[in-house]
Amino acid sequence: MIMLAAAIFILVLYSAFEWYQRYIPVRNIPCLPLDRMDGQLIVDVRDYNNRNDIVQEQTLNIPIPYLQKAFVDIQGSEIYLIAATKLERNMSIRFLKRKGIAVKGYTLTDESGCGKGRQ
């Protein structure tokens, strides 16, 4: 009985951690329009198929599934981020912060962007 309770507790704890990582927004990182993202590297974490609407010269495209392997390609300690959804934004920012890379701002392409529904 104790083993079952411990397993349930670990499962609930893991589920709460995953929920936090994905759905709770990272604070103090502003949503910026693309024209204000200058002077720093821009990392685009959208899928390769979704990036036809926003392409800039200083953009480094590293989709979310490849971010763990390719984050070493990011030169510098401060970047801007382009993501398609809030889920991509949250997971990318948290991962990059753990690796010592500061995200100065972000923009969303599939949702409200920097409009009224901003978080």
Image (cartoon, rainbow, N blue to C red):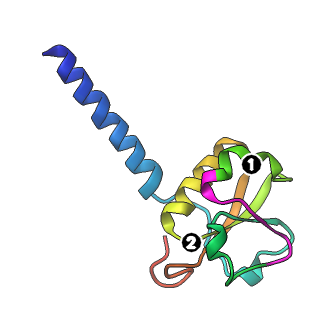
Q: Nearer the viewer, residue 65 or 34?
A: 65
Q: Is residue 104 above or below residue 9?
A: below
Q: Nearer the viewer, residue 115 or 22?
A: 22
Residue in view at x 65 percent, y 60 percent:
63
Q: Residues within 10 Å of mark 1 (few under 14, many from 20)?
A: some
Left or right of 66 on screen, residue 11? left
Q: Residue furthest top?
A: 2
Q: Is residue 58 magenta?
A: yes
Q: Residue furthest front?
A: 49
Q: Residues within 10 Å of mark 2 (few under 14, many from 20)?
A: some
Could you say which quadrant of the image residue 78 lies in?
A: bottom right
- How many badges with numbers are in the image? 2
- The circle drawn on residue 71 is 1
Quadrant placement of the N terminus:
top left
Could you say which quadrant of the image residue 6 lies in?
A: top left
Residue in view at x 86 percent, y 76 percent:
57
SS at mark 2 in the image: loop
Q: Earlier in the sequence, mark 1 or mark 2?
A: 1
Residue in view at x 76 percent, y 61 percent:
79
CA separation, marks 1 and 2? 18 Å
Start-end of magenta stretch:
56-65
Q: Could you tell me residue 93's position as x and y percent? A: 61, 55
Q: Is residue 102 visible?
A: yes
Q: Which residue is mark 2?
A: 84
Q: Is residue 9 above or below residue 41?
A: above
- The circle drawn on residue 87 is none
Could you say which quadrant of the image residue 36 lies in?
A: bottom right
Left or right of 18 on screen, residue 37? right
Kind of residue at disc 2 = Ala
Kind of residue at disc 1 = Phe
Q: Could you tell me residue 74's position as x and y percent? A: 81, 53
